[in-house]
Image (cartoon, grey):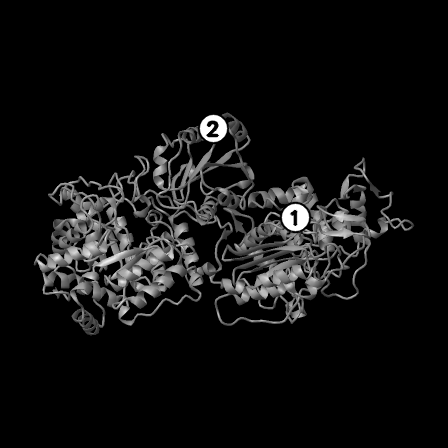
Amino acid sequence: MLFSIFSSITVFSQPIDPLITSDFSEQRQWVDSIYDGMSLQEKVGQLFMVDVFSNQSKGLTDKINVLIKEEKIGGIIFSKGGPQRQATLNNQYQELSKVPLLIGMDAEWGLAMRLDSTFALPWNMTLGALKSLHLIEEAGAAISRNSRRLGVHVNFAPVIDINTNPENPIIGNRSFGEEKSNVTEKAVAFMKGMHREGILSSAKHFPGHGDTQTDSHKTLPTVSFSKKRIEEIELYPYRKLIEEGVSSVMIAHLNVPALEEKQNSPSSTSKAIVTDLLKDKMGFNGLIFTDALNMKGASNYKNPGEIDLAAFLAGNDILLISEDIPKAKNKIIEAYQEGIISEERLAHSVRKILFAKYKAGLNNYKPVDTVNLIQDLNTVQDKVLYDDLVENAITLIKNDMGMLPIRNLENLKIAYVNFGDADGAPFFNQLSRYADVDWVKANKIEELLEKLKAYNQVIIGFHKSDKSPWAGYKFSTEEQLWIHEIARNNRTILDIFTRPYALSDLKSTSNIEGIVLSYQNSVIAQEKSAQIIFGALAAKGKLPVSIGDNFPEGTGYISKKLDRLSYGLPESVGMDSKILNKIDSLITLAIDSKMTPGLQVIVARKGKVVFERNAGFHTYEKIIPVTNSSIYDLASLTKILASLPLIMQLEENGTLNFDSKLGDLMPYFKGSNKEDIRLQDLLLHYGRLKAWLPLYVPTIDKATKRPSIKYYREEAAEGYSLPVAEKMFIRNDIRDSILGEIRKSGLEREIGYKYSDLPFYMMKYYLEDHFKASLDFTTQEELYKPLGANFTTYSPREKFDLEQIVPTEVDNLWRRQLVHGYVHDQGAAMQGGIGGHAGLFSNANDVAKIMQLYLNGGYYGGKRYLKQETIDKFNNCYYCEKNVRRGVGFDKPQLGKSGPTCGCASLSSFGHSGFTGTFAWADPEEEIVYVFLSNRTFPDVDNRKLIREDIRSKIQQIIYESLLFDEYPGLDASITETE
């Protein structure tokens, strides 16, 4: 049994008195001192909370000064505006007030509900799809943290209306759903987060606004249910929140005949509802607010002042947004003087308000600090939470034949079709990170269906405005027809980026194989949904409302993760974004100092890309900017991204092994000085091979210093079909000559480490002979197509526009032209651009996919390419005791001070660098993938600034510094000649 601290009324029902603090004696003493010093005018003034728009003129905001000084109002509810202006006004108003003002806001999904330049979390309907109550609590805490930073004491949240009416015009997305237990669980968790951060909560809209057909801002809605139904459904969450200590309740303006006998009387003025039901029967001890008294649901029924008095007599404590405070105040004072309102009744509310102010910290008021305010209200912590909330909410409600997540990319041709009136570009762009997706458009359905015949998978995105929870969400009649026809003719996935009720418009979903609900059309929602479709993330949400008979509340399939790369924020994987962003200064330095015209950088950890930059231009003329679809010459990265995976597969299936000798693998080398070189030594650069052979030099005419007509033609002709450069074709039998030159080349005198391209020259011939196909074809079929590495290819001119391919150099020595879309490496160029050591082109995102495949133990996108033990076997430093750091094919960290990495990567890490200014590295211990692509060789291969300044290693150093732990090993190091 608890005794009310506000008056002589004894309270039995509520186990938690929501307004008392742990230092109750000090709290009561403060309240007594304030209350005992108040005049009647001041006491009545405490009952009023006036609205302020910080975006209004100074003349309007200054009028509040009068209400504070003359009417002694008790609080302010801030509405639309901006945080800096609000903070300034807040401080100004608090300075004027004798008793500190209680500051409130409607911040149901964050301060952005009312303010610009602030953060918004997802709407309650989205949160209602989550299974994690912990995340809901964190949402409440985050909003409250921001509210407190801005000087707000009470947030009019959570909304606990149960949205059983899909046509509800005012609640809808503001509700956690239609099922009372789900709504209640979410509301309690949200409230706990609010209280944890010291903000007063307010459950609304009592006794329940979830099943109304009209908007109480415009008229008085009627709730026509029986008392039994209201007790069982609408009041259910209130009972639970009262038990858990909700700070306040907001009374709606509703006509509820089952609870109030007087016809068309707003619930906010009903003693039967406010006092008899909420306070007495339900035992609520906290603050009771009216909903705004200027709403038509209230103001249509009484004159200004009269509605305020009626609301106070009904049992409300705080009168929100009175239409005329002086009139209302006079009405209440008159009623007090006439004995209609007793001193005990007035003291009951005023003292409750003062107890609430103490609990909000107003006994020790401090003005809002405006320094760094915007930054503090838009933290990385909030962004990570938003990502988590959206990711966990997205709901898969139909998945015929388990079509989601999408697998077997090599067999699919995918089209994206957008409907709705909002932007779907982020969705399309994210889809395109996983597969080759075309955005198909048409003005007529017949034209669209004809275009879609070329595709065997269609993804439809329905995108509606995300600006407010009340925005339109319905399909047009034409859209309904078009979707029906598309699904009737194509394998279809439908993704809804608006409230779930939109699906109700579709007459049938039987032909739609997959349906995803993403709830909102934010950029993050679109990106996360695309990641779920391709299995980078799992679908986890549950439908918070019913959609017809086919999709009851609670529907939701958990989809499987396929270990494709996902995308998110550094902090979500234990990295510090502020530190990671220091990479930007190195990127700027590299470009401004002309180390390279442009570059791409990707950093991933734990399978998630958390840093991505596409900077600069293709050339110093600054015509074509680098984008994430710009394609670079990878140079020696080809070794570990093309040849090596195939060699590893063959070792795994027993076709070859580390002890296989070159002469056995390639009988052509029988009888040569290379026949007994073991495969392991070959790929470890321990086979005494020469570092490089100037194979192109003999093809230059000694007299003219130009390509000899003995070897080259300007047009492709019989026997001369291998493209070297623009209008430059080399004779086909040069391939035999190359192998011959390698066969007869000498060996180094001493056994030891010597980096060489020659092993991968030879293995290219071996692989093509084994697979009976070009290395280009085999890598596409075995690796890149199933991986969704659509930007990775040899001979990029055959697949991409030149504007997408980054030039590599101006070759004044051999080709005498701009090398653009042809491989820079001379030896690979002489093989028609397809070398085992060089020739591959790609973007950073695709390179990261292949490196992630290695980190995944050979698994990616639902397919196993290699076994973990195979990767471990090749990623091993067999000759460390001989001071050879190399793995089998892979480069590895330096054993001393100099080498390919920053010196901070683990010894189990591996990767490679490339002559054109490329670098790819994976660290199994820290689960990091780092990719750097550039064309530092443009226009001159002698430009070694990037290497001298060690930009790639310095970036890697920052990556490791960003890890959220205190100590890590660090050595001065640089990328060496191993490119």
Helix, strand or loop at disc 1? Answer: loop
Q: Residue 516's spot in the image, x, y percent?
A: 41, 41
Question: Circle 2: is it few (<14), some (14-19), or many (20+) Cα within 10 Å?
Answer: some
Q: Residue at x 15, y 57 (%)?
A: 332
User: In the drawing, does residue 347 fall left or right of residue 676?
Assistant: left
Q: Compared with residue 411, is residue 100 higher up or lower down, i.e. above or below?
A: below
Q: Can residue 941 be seen in this view?
A: yes
Q: Quadrant of residue 939?
A: bottom right
Q: Which of marks 1 and 2 is nearer the N terminus?
A: 2
Residue where numbered disc 2 is placed:
489
Q: Compared with residue 892, is residue 967 higher up or lower down, i.e. above or below?
A: below
Helix, strand or loop at disc 2? Answer: helix
Tag nearer the camera, 1 or 2: 1
Q: Which mark is residue 948?
A: none
Residue where numbered disc 1 is placed:
624
Q: Residue 397's spot in the image, x, y percent?
A: 37, 40
Question: Circle 1: is it few (<14), some (14-19), or many (20+) Cα within 10 Å?
Answer: some
Specify the amino acid type for callout 1. Ile
User: In the drawing, does residue 733 fall left or right of residue 397?
Assistant: right
**Which is nearer the eye, 373 or 186?**
373
Q: Tell me whether circle 1 and circle 2 mark residues in contact (CB < 8 Å).
A: no
Instruction: Measure the alpha-carbon separation of dots 1 and 2.
Output: 40 Å
Q: Residue 677's spot in the image, x, y percent?
A: 73, 57
**Which is nearer the eye, 742 or 428?**
428
For the C terminus, the quadrant is: bottom right
Q: Residue at x 33, y 54 (%)?
A: 79
Residue furthest left in the image: 339
